[in-house]
Amino acid sequence: MLEVKPQPIPEAGLTIGEAASRTGVSVHTLRYYERVGLVVSPVDRTAGGRRRYHQLDLDWITVCTRLRATGMPIKTIRRYAELVTAGPGNELDRLELLESHHADVAARVSELQENLKIVDHKIDVYRGRLAAGDADQLWAPNRMANG
Protein backbone atom coordinates (compact mmCIF):
# COMPACT_ATOMS: atom_id res chain seq x y z
CA MET A 1 0.00 0.00 0.00
CA LEU A 2 1.26 3.46 -0.91
CA GLU A 3 1.90 5.65 2.09
CA VAL A 4 0.90 9.26 1.67
CA LYS A 5 3.08 11.68 3.59
CA PRO A 6 1.29 14.71 4.99
CA GLN A 7 2.15 17.94 3.28
CA PRO A 8 4.21 20.31 5.38
CA ILE A 9 2.41 23.30 6.80
CA PRO A 10 3.65 26.65 5.55
CA GLU A 11 5.33 28.82 8.17
CA ALA A 12 2.45 31.30 7.88
CA GLY A 13 0.03 28.50 8.78
CA LEU A 14 -3.12 27.25 7.12
CA THR A 15 -6.41 28.96 6.52
CA ILE A 16 -9.43 27.63 8.38
CA GLY A 17 -10.58 25.91 5.18
CA GLU A 18 -7.21 24.23 4.70
CA ALA A 19 -7.13 23.18 8.36
CA ALA A 20 -10.64 21.76 8.05
CA SER A 21 -9.61 19.77 4.99
CA ARG A 22 -6.51 18.38 6.68
CA THR A 23 -8.27 17.41 9.90
CA GLY A 24 -11.42 16.06 8.27
CA VAL A 25 -13.79 18.34 10.16
CA SER A 26 -15.86 21.23 8.91
CA VAL A 27 -14.99 24.90 9.19
CA HIS A 28 -18.04 25.20 11.46
CA THR A 29 -16.62 22.49 13.75
CA LEU A 30 -13.26 24.26 14.00
CA ARG A 31 -14.96 27.50 14.97
CA TYR A 32 -17.17 25.62 17.44
CA TYR A 33 -14.18 23.86 19.06
CA GLU A 34 -12.53 27.23 19.54
CA ARG A 35 -15.71 28.91 20.84
CA VAL A 36 -16.46 26.24 23.46
CA GLY A 37 -12.93 26.10 24.80
CA LEU A 38 -11.60 22.90 23.29
CA VAL A 39 -8.58 24.53 21.65
CA VAL A 40 -5.63 24.47 24.05
CA SER A 41 -3.91 27.57 22.73
CA PRO A 42 -5.24 30.61 20.94
CA VAL A 43 -5.23 30.12 17.18
CA ASP A 44 -2.94 32.60 15.43
CA ARG A 45 -4.59 35.32 13.44
CA THR A 46 -3.46 37.44 10.54
CA ALA A 47 -3.37 41.21 10.81
CA GLY A 48 -6.82 41.10 9.20
CA GLY A 49 -8.12 38.76 11.94
CA ARG A 50 -8.25 35.57 9.88
CA ARG A 51 -7.36 32.34 11.66
CA ARG A 52 -4.07 30.62 10.83
CA TYR A 53 -3.56 27.04 11.98
CA HIS A 54 -0.22 25.36 12.67
CA GLN A 55 0.77 21.71 13.20
CA LEU A 56 0.19 21.86 16.96
CA ASP A 57 -3.35 23.12 16.30
CA LEU A 58 -4.03 20.33 13.81
CA ASP A 59 -2.65 17.70 16.17
CA TRP A 60 -4.85 18.93 19.01
CA ILE A 61 -7.94 19.13 16.79
CA THR A 62 -7.27 15.52 15.79
CA VAL A 63 -7.14 14.53 19.48
CA CYS A 64 -10.46 16.31 20.12
CA THR A 65 -12.04 14.70 17.06
CA ARG A 66 -10.90 11.23 18.10
CA LEU A 67 -12.13 11.74 21.66
CA ARG A 68 -15.53 12.85 20.31
CA ALA A 69 -15.60 9.78 18.04
CA THR A 70 -15.27 7.62 21.15
CA GLY A 71 -18.31 9.33 22.63
CA MET A 72 -16.50 11.64 25.03
CA PRO A 73 -18.83 14.54 25.85
CA ILE A 74 -17.76 18.07 24.87
CA LYS A 75 -17.80 18.99 28.56
CA THR A 76 -15.24 16.28 29.32
CA ILE A 77 -13.03 17.22 26.37
CA ARG A 78 -13.19 20.82 27.57
CA ARG A 79 -12.07 19.68 31.05
CA TYR A 80 -9.21 17.73 29.49
CA ALA A 81 -8.23 20.79 27.42
CA GLU A 82 -8.28 22.91 30.59
CA LEU A 83 -5.98 20.45 32.33
CA VAL A 84 -3.59 20.36 29.37
CA THR A 85 -3.61 24.16 29.12
CA ALA A 86 -2.85 24.49 32.83
CA GLY A 87 0.47 22.75 32.20
CA PRO A 88 2.47 20.40 34.41
CA GLY A 89 1.26 19.25 37.79
CA ASN A 90 -2.13 17.78 36.93
CA GLU A 91 -1.05 14.67 35.08
CA LEU A 92 -2.84 12.44 37.60
CA ASP A 93 -6.10 14.31 36.90
CA ARG A 94 -5.58 13.85 33.17
CA LEU A 95 -4.86 10.16 33.65
CA GLU A 96 -7.97 9.67 35.80
CA LEU A 97 -10.14 11.46 33.23
CA LEU A 98 -8.79 9.30 30.40
CA GLU A 99 -9.00 6.07 32.40
CA SER A 100 -12.61 6.79 33.30
CA HIS A 101 -13.43 7.43 29.66
CA HIS A 102 -11.57 4.30 28.64
CA ALA A 103 -13.76 2.25 30.99
CA ASP A 104 -16.89 3.81 29.46
CA VAL A 105 -15.71 3.07 25.92
CA ALA A 106 -14.72 -0.48 26.83
CA ALA A 107 -18.18 -1.09 28.31
CA ARG A 108 -19.84 0.21 25.12
CA VAL A 109 -17.56 -1.94 22.96
CA SER A 110 -18.47 -4.98 25.06
CA GLU A 111 -22.17 -4.20 24.67
CA LEU A 112 -21.75 -3.79 20.92
CA GLN A 113 -19.94 -7.12 20.73
CA GLU A 114 -22.83 -8.80 22.56
CA ASN A 115 -25.34 -7.16 20.22
CA LEU A 116 -23.28 -8.18 17.22
CA LYS A 117 -23.70 -11.81 18.26
CA ILE A 118 -27.43 -11.67 17.47
CA VAL A 119 -26.68 -10.11 14.09
CA ASP A 120 -24.17 -12.90 13.38
CA HIS A 121 -26.71 -15.50 14.45
CA LYS A 122 -29.39 -14.06 12.16
CA ILE A 123 -26.91 -13.96 9.25
CA ASP A 124 -26.06 -17.61 9.86
CA VAL A 125 -29.77 -18.53 9.92
CA TYR A 126 -30.48 -16.72 6.65
CA ARG A 127 -27.41 -18.16 4.92
CA GLY A 128 -28.32 -21.65 6.10
CA ARG A 129 -31.93 -21.37 5.00
CA LEU A 130 -31.00 -19.88 1.65
CA ALA A 131 -28.45 -22.65 1.07
CA ALA A 132 -31.02 -25.30 2.06
CA GLY A 133 -33.59 -23.76 -0.24
CA ASP A 134 -36.20 -23.27 2.46
CA ALA A 135 -35.80 -19.58 3.22
CA ASP A 136 -39.51 -19.17 2.58
CA GLN A 137 -40.06 -21.02 5.85
CA LEU A 138 -38.52 -18.20 7.87
CA TRP A 139 -40.96 -16.63 10.27
CA ALA A 140 -42.72 -13.50 9.13
CA PRO A 141 -45.52 -11.93 11.13
CA ASN A 142 -48.88 -11.93 9.44
CA ARG A 143 -50.58 -8.79 10.65
CA MET A 144 -53.79 -9.56 8.73
CA ALA A 145 -54.31 -12.82 10.60
CA ASN A 146 -54.15 -11.01 13.92
CA GLY A 147 -56.85 -8.68 13.09
Image (cartoon, rainbow, N blue to C red):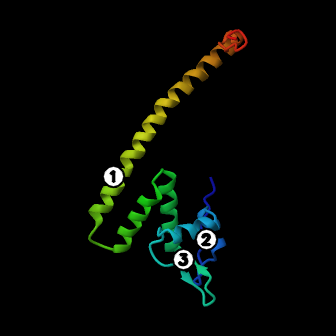
Residues at marks 3 and 1, CA–CA distance in whole angstroms: 29 Å
Task: Identify whether 5 is placed above or below 15.
Answer: above
Residue type at mark 1: give it: Glu
Residue 89: give x, y in percent of width and height.
26, 71
Q: Nearer the viewer, mark 3 or mark 1?
A: 1
x and y percentages locating residue 46 in the rendered image: 60, 87
Q: Secondary structure at mark 2?
A: helix
Q: Earlier in the sequence, mark 2 or mark 3?
A: 2
**Which badge, 3 or 1, is on the more N-terminal residue?**
3
Which residue is rendered at x = 46% and y = 55% of the image?
A: 73
Tell me where residue 126 sits by quadrant.
top right
| Cα gap from disc 2 to disc 1, whole angstroms | 30 Å
- Callout 2 amino acid: Ala
- Regarding mark 1 in the picture, which secondary structure is present there? helix
Q: Which residue is mark 2?
A: 19
| Residue indicated by mark 1 | 99
Judging by the rendered image, the residue that carries numbered circle 3 is 54
Q: Is residue 131 above or below residue 71?
A: above
For image coordinates 36% across by 55% down, the residue present is: 98
Amino acid of disc 3? His
Is disc 3 in contact with disc 1, using a CB cutoff of under 8 Å? Answer: no
